[in-house]
Image (cartoon, grey):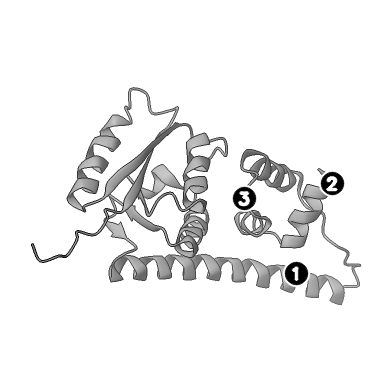
Amino acid sequence: MNGTQNPVARRAAIYARVSTFDKGQNPETQLRELRRFAEARGLTVAHELVDIASGTRDSRPNYRLLFELARKRAIDVVLVWRYDRFARSTQALVNALVEFRDLGVDFMSYQENIDTTTSQGKMVFAIMASLAEFESALIAERVKAGMARARAEGIRIGRPKVPVEVKHRILSLKRTDPARSVRMIARECGVSVGTVVNCLKKG
């Protein structure tokens, strides 16, 4: 014995999802391969979370639970089958990865072979985040250009009304996940923090 100890295995949460439209699809197909992958990487599977729901829906209880576990520092790694089994959009994926990064939780996608513990995985994440930021900047520039044109044409510019569907989405995100921060909701909905605060106050 040399007196050294084996490092404690990192705790992984496996997340799998099958769509309500994927008839005959069994989440065990994803889980089986993810278990093998975790074992090969020396990870301890602490949680297996499965949702049977469309990827566009917010009412995914185990998806919300995954973030609760991360925020409580109950897991070290999130392991998913594929990006589209996890997030409903690139922006949602980037937002999730940013939060995981801030919490010190790594992210691995089996099918895409992306692992944020590696240099390649970090590079892919940086590219995705840059693209999402670029898209947001383009939208902001279009809005500014439109307002400038309206002013030049003598059109009175007031505070734009928040679309009803955006209000509903803000309220839905907070209702389904009370721990979700105002800043996170603002990022996901593409609005300002102040807009989110006002919508939540008015209900």
- On the rendered image, what quadrant is the N terminus found in? bottom left
Q: Residue 180 carries which label?
A: 3
Earlier along the polypeptide chain: callout 1 or callout 3? 1
The CA distance from mark 2 to mark 3 is 18 Å
The amino acid marked with disc number 2 is Lys
Specify the quadrant of the image occupied by residue 13: top left
| Kind of element beneath mark 2 | helix
Specify the quadrant of the image occupied by residue 114: bottom left
Crowd rating for badge 3 (residues with CA inside 10 Å; few <14, some 14–19, many 20+): some
The amino acid marked with disc number 3 is Arg
Q: Is residue 88 visible?
A: no
Q: Is residue 114 visible?
A: yes
Q: Mark 1 points at which residue?
A: 146
Crowd rating for badge 1 (residues with CA inside 10 Å; few <14, some 14–19, many 20+): few
Percent of width and height locating residue 116 = 34, 63
The amino acid marked with disc number 1 is Gly
Percent of width and height locating residue 142 = 67, 69
Task: Pick whichever, 65 or 16, lies toward us.
Answer: 65
Q: Name the residue under label 2.
A: 202
Specify the quadrant of the image occupied by residue 7: bottom left
Task: Pick whichever, 89 or 70, lies toward us.
Answer: 70
Which residue occupies 60% across, 70% down? 138
